[in-house]
Image (spheres, grey):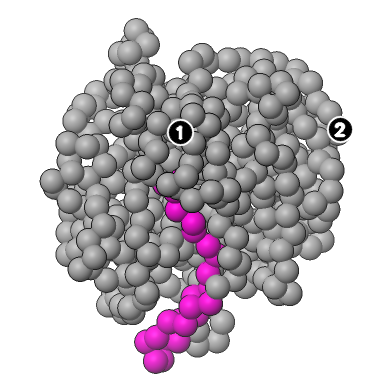
């Protein structure tokens, strides 16, 4: 493993919080983009031993750009002020007192719900609420259940009801919880699901009537608690897909080839079948060196009557961070977007002194109706991250909108917020918003429309 590469280059943390107004722009920002593009990721306050550094354990930092009336009003980056982060920065703690044993600055997802902004993580750790300007309000009870489960980083949002759905696990617990909250934060449903193999689950699937549960040989291992990542690959455990009605009830389990689902692109029902398009790490997955894998896009077609799953490779270029038009979540759809993670060399040949070696810098647009894929390449040292799709104000088609993402500009040594026209995916960007700082490679984010 080459853990030291997660401390260098565009993985390396930034050391300052920056606020900048009236950002320079090349091109033209579409006038119908009124809101904030936010993205979060690990940004450790200090790294004691680069050779043993685990990237996912870095304290969360949110980066955001506010767009309005064709202007980029501001850029901000802020650490999420957990109790430990506030103490390290010499600041008063934010919000209510916390149990410091289970307190952490979330670093996986930042999302809006009910007009509020939340930084999310997993494993039963509490979300934190943020202001629209990214300041920390404090830890919150979004999705908290009496058993200590919290909203998962990959919670799903029902566009019809405004409800938020989460499939949550807690370190060491032998059951999961399916949790549903109304926009105001009231718990609507709590369903316990037995999970005796203690699985690690980063994501799940949600269709109109069903919840899709992914388990794999990656499971909780108490012997690894001291490492901070208490999960290991247990070859004796199966890879399975579970299907459960949204109202709760019996879970139907179906076996699959060894591997782990990283993320769900979308899932929907079609007649008597369920279709799930997922990013799969085929074979063994090493959670402490997530950049060394070669995840691919697969389609799983579930025959509910027969209780069987048919798997199909949709695209073999290594990729992750799949996104789509959220208006089609849980429904039949045509287009999906993802970030390429293709290796230029096998992990064993990577140069630890060149931390970006092994990552291409492109995003992909999949037309699932025709089976074709378009690519937007940013260049060898661009370090492009996850893209988010934002529908145009008067969208006439599913892909009528924009792709937003942070891309490193090696000439400036800082990041741009790049805006692409999704229907001209491989063409020149509509706009590049030039940020005054570098944005390290990170995890997930969202477009938060103006209220």
Labelled disc at residue 112: none
| Residue displayed at 37% across by 87% down | 307
Q: Is residue 200 above or below residue 122?
A: below
Please state which of residues 108 and 352 is positioned toward the viewer in this rendering.
352
Q: Is residue 30 left or right of residue 345?
A: right
Q: Position of residue 218 (x, y in %)?
A: 28, 58
Residue displayed at 40% across by 31% down? 4
- Judging by the rendered image, the residue that carries numbered circle 1 is 352
The x, y position of residue 443, in whole percent, is 50, 41
Q: Is residue 306 magenta?
A: yes
23 to 90, vertically: above or below: below
- Does label 1 or label 2 sit earlier along the sequence? 2
Label 2 crowd bin: few (<14), some (14–19), many (20+), radius 10 Å: few
The image shows residue 277 at horizontal and vertical percentages of: 53, 68
The Cα–Cα distance between marks 1 and 2, rounded to whole angstroms, is 37 Å
- Residue lying furthest front: 349
Q: Nearer the viewer, residue 36 or 144?
A: 36
Q: Position of residue 384 (x, y in %)?
A: 63, 40
Residue 300 is covered by the magenta coloring: yes
Which residue extends farthest top? 90
Q: Where does the N terminus fall, quadrant-wise?
A: top left
Can you say which quadrant of the picture contains the C terminus? top right
Residue extent of the magenta highlight: 290-312
The residue wearing badge 2 is 27
Q: Is residue 183 above or below residue 380?
A: below
Quadrant of the image occupied by residue 326: bottom right
């Amino acid at each position: 493993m080459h853990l030291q590469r997660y401390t260098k280059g565009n993985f390396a943390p930034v050391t300052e919080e920056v606020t900048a107004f009236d950002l320079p722009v090349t091109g033209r920002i579409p006038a119908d983009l009124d809101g904030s593009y936010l993205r979060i990721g690990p940004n450790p306050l200090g790294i004691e031993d680069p050779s043993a550094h685990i990237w996912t354990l870095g304290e969360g930092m949110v980066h955001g750009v506010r767009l309005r009336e064709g202007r980029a009003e501001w850029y901000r980056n802020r650490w999420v002020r957990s109790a430990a982060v506030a103490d390290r920065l010499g600041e008063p703690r934010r919000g209510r007192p916390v149990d410091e044993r289970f307190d952490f600055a979330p670093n996986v997802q930042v999302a809006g719900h009910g007009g509020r902004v939340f930084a999310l993580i997993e494993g039963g750790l509490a979300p934190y609420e943020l202001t629209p300007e990214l300041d920390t309000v404090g830890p919150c009870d979004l999705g908290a259940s009496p058993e200590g489960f919290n909203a998962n980083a990959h919670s799903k949002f029902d566009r019809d009801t405004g409800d938020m759905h989460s499939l949550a696990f807690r370190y060491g617990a032998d059951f999961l919880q399916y949790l549903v909250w109304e926009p105001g934060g009231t718990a609507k449903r709590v369903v316990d699901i037995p999970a005796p193999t203690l699985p690690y689950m980063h994501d799940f699937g949600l269709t109109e009537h069903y919840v899709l549960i992914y388990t794999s040989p990656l499971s909780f291992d108490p012997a690894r608690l001291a490492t901070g990542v208490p999960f290991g690959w247990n070859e004796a455990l199966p890879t399975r897909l579970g299907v459960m009605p949204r109202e709760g009830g019996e879970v139907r389990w179906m076996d699959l080839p060894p591997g782990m689902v990283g993320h769900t692109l979308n899932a929907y029902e079609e007649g008597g079948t369920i279709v799930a398009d997922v990013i799969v790490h085929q074979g063994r997955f090493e959670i402490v060196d997530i950049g060394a894998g070669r995840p691919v896009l697969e389609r799983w077609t579930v025959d509910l009557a027969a209780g069987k799953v048919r798997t199909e490779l949709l695209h073999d270029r290594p990729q992750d961070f799949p996104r789509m038009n959220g208006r089609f979540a849980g429904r039949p759809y045509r287009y999906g977007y993802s970030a390429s993670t293709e290796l230029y060399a096998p992990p064993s040949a990577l140069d630890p002194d060149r931390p970006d070696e092994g990552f291409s810098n492109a995003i992909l647009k999949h037309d699932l109706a025709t089976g074709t894929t378009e690519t937007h390449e940013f260049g060898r040292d661009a370090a492009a991250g996850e893209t988010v799709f934002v529908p145009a104000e008067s969208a006439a088609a599913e892909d009528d909108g924009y792709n937003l993402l942070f891309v490193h500009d090696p000439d400036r040594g800082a990041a741009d917020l790049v805006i692409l026209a999704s229907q001209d995916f491989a063409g020149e960007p509509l706009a590049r918003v030039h940020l005054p700082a570098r944005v390290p490679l990170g995890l997930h984010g969202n477009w938060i429309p103006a209220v």
